[in-house]
Image (cartoon, rainbow, N blue to C red):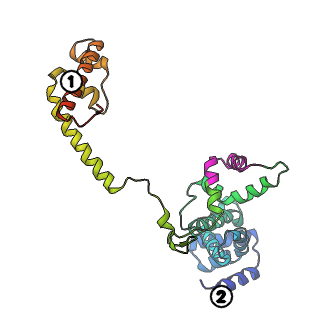
């Protein structure tokens, strides 16, 4: 819809007559039962004042008012499609929710390139944070940022960390990672050039992989010095993800858990000796 079309829609809305309850009911029934396009047009046009009024409440989010009105009109048509006249509720009362929901969804999709506010609590935080912050900031007793965020969190029913994050998002516009940054010496670079990755470097990944494979070969070779019972205890106690208990192993082997501990301790000493004998340049092992 062009800007001229939006202006014409607003002017037509302001000139449209108000409907009585009986006229509203008749139009709604004609649209629902007969799919009369003319009835839908008259019903929606007579309620465009409501759309404009609701849209005007959201103009501080930095989006074009005409676009908000257009999205509100979409919500109005959705309300007309779902309206049930026999419930004896005025159409304006029913349509207000759909108009507001459509406008809020549009704002959340277009206010930032980063998707946010998908849950009902996050939506409530997004649309009420500024109002609550202004209200609480006007109190006689000054509040710290932490206290302010906690009060807002309690009022909306979200975590304090969510309030702090949303407050930071609303404090400034999106910034591209490709935006240039100039230092004091006059050289420039993109913002993304200053992002630090916490992931290990490729050479570190390769080095760790090689070392892990080498240690695995050494350990497999050293296990040959253990007896069958010692090997079973070491495998189930030290080389499995779950790690069997001394008691469970004792029951399997028909010995006490203290005896299992003694065998395990002796086996680990034998392994350590074997590893240091075969790889004397390696001073420490963890089994």
Q: Could you say where residue 122 lies in the image, as x and y percent from the top left?
A: 60, 55
| Residue beneath disc 1 | 270
Query: Is residue 231 found left or right of 84 in the rendered image?
Result: left
Q: Residues within 10 Å of mark 1 (few under 14, many from 20)?
A: some
Circle 1 — which element? Answer: helix
Q: Residue at the spot x=73%, y=69% of the render?
A: 22
Image quadrant where one finds the C terminus: top left
Residue nearest the viewer, comparing 85 with 1 = 1
- Separation of disc 2 and disc 1 at Cα? 89 Å
Is 33 contained in the magenta span? no
For marks 2 and 1, the one nearer the N-term is 2
Residue nearest the viewer, comparing 94 with 7 = 7
Query: Is residue 227 found left or right of 209 in the rendered image?
Result: left
**Vertical arrangement, residue 137 with respect to residue 285, above or below:** below
| Residue beneath disc 2 | 4
**Magenta residues, as a range?**
143-164
Q: Could you say where residue 117 lies in the image, as x and y percent from the top left?
A: 58, 58
């Amino acid at each position: 819809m062009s800007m001229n079309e939006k202006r014409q829609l607003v002017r037509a809305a302001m000139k449209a007559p108000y409907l009585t309850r009986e006229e509203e009911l008749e139009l709604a029934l004609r649209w629902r039962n007969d799919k009369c396009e003319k009835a839908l047009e008259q019903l929606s046009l007579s309620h465009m004042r409501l759309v404009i009024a609701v849209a005007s409440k959201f103009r501080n989010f930095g989006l074009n008012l005409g676009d908000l009105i257009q999205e509100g009109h979409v919500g109005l048509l959705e309300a007309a499609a779902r309206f049930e006249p026999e419930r004896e509720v005025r159409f304006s009362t029913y349509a207000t929710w759909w108009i507001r929901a459509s406008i809020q969804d549009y704002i959340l999709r277009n206010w930032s390139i980063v998707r946010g506010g998908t849950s009902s609590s996050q939506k409530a935080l997004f649309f009420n944070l500024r109002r609550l912050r202004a209200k609480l900031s006007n109190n006689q007793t000054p509040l710290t940022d932490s206290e302010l965020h906690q009060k807002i969190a309690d009022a909306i029913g979200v975590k304090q960390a969510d309030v702090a994050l949303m407050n930071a998002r609303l404090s400034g516009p999106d910034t591209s990672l490709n935006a240039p940054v100039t230092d004091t010496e006059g050289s420039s670079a993109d913002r993304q050039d200053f992002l630090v990755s916490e992931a290990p470097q490729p050479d570190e990944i390769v080095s760790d992989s090689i070392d892990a494979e080498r240690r695995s070969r050494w350990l497999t070779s050293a296990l040959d010095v253990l007896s069958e019972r010692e090997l079973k205890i070491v495998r189930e106690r030290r080389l499995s993800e779950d790690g069997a208990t001394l008691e469970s192993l004792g029951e399997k082997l028909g010995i006490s858990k203290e005896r299992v501990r003694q065998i395990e301790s002796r086996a680990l000493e034998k392994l350590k000796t074997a590893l240091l004998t075969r790889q004397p340049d390696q001073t420490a092992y963890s089994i």
